[in-house]
C-alpha cells in the first residue's frame, strides 16, 4: 500500500505520466502465451508432439512426430510471423474500444496498412466462434448489404437506378435460436439460392429436432425441407401468431446494421465476413467484465487464423465470379 500512498503524493501531471508509462510496460509484457495451449500439430492435427527447443521470449519450438514439421505457439494463429507482437495487447484493447484505424495508428505508431492487416488477422481467428448445435426453435432470415469496394482505386459507383436485389448487393444469412446461439454468414452476390446456402451455412449446427421459423421465403422453405427439418412460416399480417415470430433475428439484423453504420459507415464486401465475425464477438462479450481475456482466449485458440487471412483475397474472387 506504500506505493499507493507515494502515488497519491504526486502531482496530477506526474500521476498521468506515470500511468502512461505503466500502461506501455503492461502492453509489452502481457504473457500472450498464457492464452495459447498447444495440444495438436497445426499442420496434421496429430497430438504426438515433443518439445524441440526453447527460444528467446519464453516460447517453445515443437516437433510433430507424425509429419516431422516444427512449429511454435504462434504458428497458424493470428500472430503467425507478426513483428511487434508486444503491441498486440494494446491493439486488442483498442479494438475492444472500437477505435478507428486512424486512432490506432497514432496510439501505437504503426502504419495504416499494418493496423488494417492486424485487424483482419484478429478477425480471421473468429470464423468459427459458434459451433454448438442450435436448440429448439431457430429463426432465420436473409438480409442484404450494398456491394462495396471501399479502399479500391477507381471504385465502380453504385447504380442508384437499380431496384430490388441485384448483384450489387450481398446476401447475408442471419440465424439465431432462443438460447443466444447465433450465426452470420455471407452467402453470395445477389439473392440467396438453395445451393449457395448449402455451401455457406454450417449444416452441422442444425438437427432434426429444430423447428425453423422464417418469413415466407420459398428458398428458405425448400432448403430446410430438403434437410428434412420442420419449417414454419411467420406471417406478418397476423397480429399474433403464437410464438411463430422472427423478432430475435430482426433485432440482431438491426443491431448489426446500426453497428456497421455507426462505426464504419460502410464496409468493404471483401472483408464483410470479418466484420460479421467481429459483431459475433461483441455479442459474446456483452455483459462480460473480463472481455479482454475472453477475446485473447478465442484469438489464440484458432490455429487456422493465418490460413483464413491468406484466403481472403481468393474467397473474394470466388464471391465475385
Ligand atoms: Zn504434424
Image (spheres, helix red, strand yellow):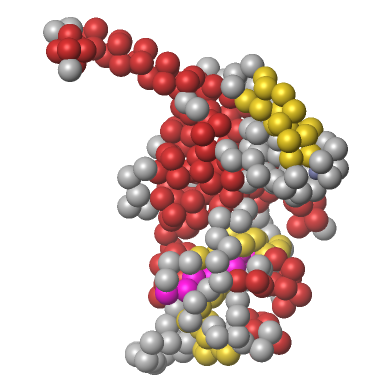
Q: Which stretch appears magenta?
A: 171-178
Quadrant (top left, top right, bottom left, bottom right) of the N terminus: top left
Question: Taking 197 as reference, is 35 above or below it?
Answer: above
Quadrant (top left, top right, bottom left, bottom right) of the C terminus: bottom right
Q: Nearer the viewer, residue 175 or 73?
A: 73
Farthest-out residue, right: 67
Question: Taking 119 as reference, is 81 above or below it?
Answer: above
Residue 221 relative to residue 15: left or right: right
Magenta run includes residue 177: yes
**Rendering coords of residue 142 (x, y %):** 58, 71
Q: Residue at x 27, y 14 (%)?
A: 16
Q: Residue at x 79, y 39 (%)?
A: 64
Magenta run includes residue 176: yes
Is the magenta region chiefly helix, strand or loop? strand
Q: Nearer the viewer, residue 288 or 41?
A: 41
* Total marks placed: 0
Residue 233 is at least partly visible in this image: yes
Q: Nearer the viewer, residue 248 or 66?
A: 66
Question: Taking 76 as reference, is 160 above or below it?
Answer: below
Q: Ligand 1 shows up in which quadrant of the image?
A: top right
Q: Nearer the viewer, residue 246 or 74?
A: 74
**Rendering coords of residue 123 (x, y %):** 59, 44
Q: Residue at x 47, y 87 (%)?
A: 234
**Rendering coords of residue 274 (x, y %):** 60, 49
**Rendering coords of residue 215 (x, y %):** 52, 83
Q: Residue at x 67, y 22 (%)?
A: 54
Residue 246 relative to residue 200: left or right: left
Residue 123 is at least partly visible in this image: no
Question: Taking 125 as reference, is 51 above or below it?
Answer: above
Name the quadrant containing residue 21. Answer: top left
Amino acid at each position: 500500500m506504500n506505493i499507493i500512498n507515494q502515488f497519491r503524493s504526486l502531482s496530477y501531471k506526474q500521476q498521468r505520466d506515470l500511468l502512461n508509462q505503466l500502461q506501455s510496460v503492461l502492453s509489452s509484457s502481457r504473457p500472450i502465451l498464457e492464452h495459447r495451449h498447444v495440444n495438436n500439430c497445426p499442420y496434421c492435427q496429430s497430438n504426438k508432439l515433443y518439445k524441440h527447443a526453447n527460444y528467446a521470449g519464453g516460447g517453445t519450438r515443437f516437433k510433430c512426430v507424425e509429419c516431422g514439421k516444427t512449429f511454435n505457439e504462434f504458428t497458424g494463429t493470428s500472430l503467425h510471423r507478426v513483428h511487434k507482437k508486444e503491441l498486440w495487447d494494446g491493439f486488442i484493447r483498442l479494438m475492444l474500444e472500437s477505435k478507428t484505424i486512424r486512432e490506432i495508428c497514432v496510439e501505437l505508431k504503426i502504419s495504416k496498412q499494418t493496423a488494417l492487416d492486424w485487424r483482419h488477422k484478429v478477425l480471421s481467428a473468429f470464423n468459427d466462434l459458434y459451433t454448438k448445435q442450435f436448440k429448439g426453435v431457430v429463426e432465420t432470415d436473409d438480409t442484404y448489404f450494398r456491394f462495396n469496394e471501399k479502399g479500391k482505386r477507381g471504385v465502380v459507383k453504385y447504380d442508384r437506378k437499380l431496384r430490388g436485389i441485384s448483384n450489387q448487393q450481398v446476401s447475408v444469412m442471419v440465424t439465431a435460436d432462443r438460447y443466444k446461439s447465433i450465426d452470420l454468414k455471407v452467402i453470395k452476390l445477389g439473392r440467396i439460392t438453395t445451393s449457395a446456402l448449402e455451401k455457406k451455412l454450417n449444416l452441422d449446427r442444425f438437427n432434426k429436432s429444430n423447428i425453423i421459423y422464417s418469413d415466407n421465403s420459398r428458398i428458405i422453405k425448400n432448403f430446410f425441407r430438403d434437410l428434412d427439418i420442420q419449417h414454419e412460416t411467420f406471417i406478418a399480417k397476423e397480429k399474433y401468431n403464437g410464438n411463430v415470430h422472427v423478432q430475435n433475428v430482426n433485432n440482431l439484423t438491426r443491431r448489426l446494421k446500426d453497428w456497421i453504420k455507426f462505426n464504419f459507415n460502410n464496409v468493404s464486401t471483401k472483408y464483410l465476413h470479418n466484420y460479421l465475425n467481429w459483431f459475433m464477438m461483441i455479442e459474446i462479450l456483452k455483459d462480460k467484465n473480463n472481455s479482454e481475456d475472453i477475446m485473447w482466449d478465442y484469438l489464440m485458440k484458432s490455429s487456422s487464423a493465418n490460413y483464413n487471412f491468406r484466403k481472403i483475397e481468393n474467397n473474394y474472387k470466388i464471391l465475385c465470379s
